Image (tube, helix red, strand yellow):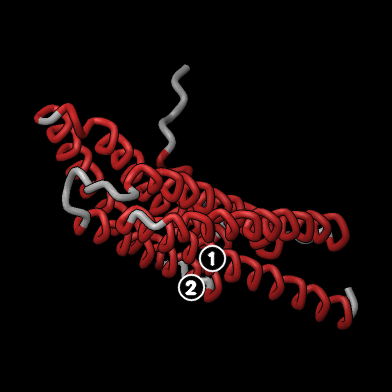
């Protein structure tokens, strides 16, 4: 490869990283707006989330196409190939974060002018942790910080515990008062979507480990195949 080709390849890599960062910022905004829409019963924020969804989907398609073109044209190997594949995985996870934000926002319609079945503060705290995870994952991807995966895994355990606690509270609330079953069930789905966003953030941090070290930490969670 000539010096010019190397420089062009480096430029393409930087563009891909920028696309991941841009998508990360967009889906974070979607997520924050969606949670706020549930808290306040705000239909305007629901509309904003749905508008952002179209932008995120378009950016996802454009970035995926660019990655596939790079593989075809540049035929990268080793760390360069791993990074392109990590970008493809990451933008897929970010697109799914946008999907979860959309689900949360649509549930907000049930709370317009109606009280929430349980206090919202613990759900808000859970969402704040997930936002921190998402920011940390994007920062790790940009800086190629493989140590972030372990930190985000610990935070993910915290989010899982909060999810279990909140779902338990909502189930008890439904049992105690059948009149709140519909709204409590909607909040169960909201809590589950928040938890899934944390999972996607953890995934992105794990892709960084694969780029830097060549080891995919997801494989360590697979159970051995029994003969």
The circle on residue 139 is: 2
| Residue that appears at 47% across and 55% down | 46
Percent coordinates x, y for residue 59 in the rendering: 69, 60
Q: Is residue 160 left or right of residue 43?
A: left
The circle on residue 24 is: 1
| Residue that appears at 88% across and 60% down | 73
Question: Distance between the Cα atoms at labels 1 and 2?
Answer: 10 Å
Q: Is residue 9 left or right of residue 212?
A: right
From where the camera sits, is residue 96 visible? yes
Percent coordinates x, y for residue 84 in the rendering: 69, 60
Q: Estimate how packed mark 2 is, as few (under 14), some (14 to 19) or many (20 or more) residues with alpha carbons within 10 Å.
A: some
The circle on residue 89 is: none
| Residue that appears at 17% across and 47% down | 118
Which mark is first along the chain, 2 or 1? 1
Q: Looking at this rendering, what residue extends furthest in the left direction? A: 176
Image height of 204 relative to 13, above or below: above
Quadrant showing the N terminus: bottom right
Q: Depth check: 80 or 227 in front?
A: 80
Q: Depth check: 16 or 193 in front?
A: 193
Percent coordinates x, y for residue 131 in the rendering: 38, 64
| Residue that appears at 17% across and 27% down | 178
Image height of 114 relative to 40, above or below: above
Mark in front: 1 vs 2:
1
């Amino acid at each position: 490869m000539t010096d010019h080709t190397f420089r062009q390849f480096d430029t393409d890599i930087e563009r891909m990283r920028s696309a991941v960062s841009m998508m990360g910022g967009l889906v974070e905004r979607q997520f924050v707006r969606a949670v706020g829409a549930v808290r306040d019963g705000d239909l305007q924020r629901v509309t904003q989330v749905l508008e952002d969804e179209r932008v995120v989907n378009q950016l996802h398609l454009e970035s995926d196409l660019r990655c596939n073109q790079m593989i075809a044209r540049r035929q990268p190997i080793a760390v360069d190939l791993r990074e392109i594949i990590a970008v493809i995985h990451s933008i897929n996870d970010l697109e799914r974060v946008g999907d979860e934000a959309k689900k949360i926002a649509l549930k907000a319609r049930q709370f317009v002018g109606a009280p929430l079945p349980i206090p919202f503060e613990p759900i808000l705290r859970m969402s704040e942790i997930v936002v921190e995870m998402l920011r940390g994952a994007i920062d790790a991807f940009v800086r190629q910080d493989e140590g972030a995966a372990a930190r985000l895994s610990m935070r993910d355990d915290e989010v899982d515990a909060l999810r279990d606690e909140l779902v338990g509270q909502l189930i008890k609330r439904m049992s105690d008062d059948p009149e709140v079953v519909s709204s409590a069930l909607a909040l169960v789905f909201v809590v589950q979507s928040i938890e899934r966003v944390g999972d996607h953030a953890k995934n992105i941090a794990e892709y960084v480990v694969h780029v830097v070290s060549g080891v995919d930490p997801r494989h360590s969670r697979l159970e051995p195949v029994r003969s």
